[in-house]
Image: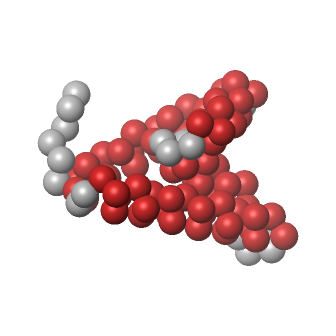
Amino acid sequence: MNRHAKRILVLIVGWAFILLGVVGLFLPVLQGVLFLLIGLVILSSEYVWAHHLLARVKERFPKLGRVADEATDKAKAWMRRLTGQPRTD
């Protein structure tokens, strides 16, 4: 997958989760905060403001920060498998 297509996919998925999170804040069926956090994790790779906001959330809520870090690692591993890139550890 080329870099441009990957960036577009990341932006679409990240903003979709942010949108679901906003809708989820008003609907009792969706977990709004969870979707907002997932969207921030995804968008933090592309936007500085999302990275800074995620860092502030991690600072304020350390346990949530650890969960976000684990989710980020899992998402990176999933993207490596999806794109066929070798591990860099």
Quadrant (top left/top right/bottom left/bottom right) for the N terminus: bottom left
- Residue lying furthest right: 26
Judge left or right: residue 26 versus residue 8.
Answer: right
Judge left or right: residue 51 versus residue 77.
Answer: right
Residue 14 seen: yes
Q: Position of residue 2 (x, y in %)?
A: 25, 57
Which residue is rendered at x = 51% and y = 65% of the image?
12
Which residue is rendered at x = 50% and y = 45% of the image?
46
Residue 58 seen: no
Which residue is rendered at x = 15% and y = 42% of the image?
86
Which sits in the foreground, 77 or 85? 85
**Whether residue 14 is situated above or below residue 73 in the rendered picture:** below
Which residue is rendered at x = 50% and y = 59% of the image?
11
Q: Which color scheme is applied?
A: secondary structure
Judge left or right: residue 72 versus residue 41.
Answer: left
Which sits in the foreground, 47 or 41? 47
Looking at the rendered structure, the number of numbered marks drawn on it comes to 0
Q: Position of residue 32 (x, y in %)?
A: 73, 61
Q: Would you identify the image quadrant in which residue 20 lies?
A: bottom right
Judge left or right: residue 65 versus residue 32.
Answer: left
Q: Position of residue 51 (x, y in %)?
A: 59, 36
Q: Position of residue 68 (x, y in %)?
A: 55, 40
Quadrant (top left/top right/bottom left/bottom right) for the C terminus: top left
**Whether residue 83 is situated above or below residue 70 in the rendered picture:** below
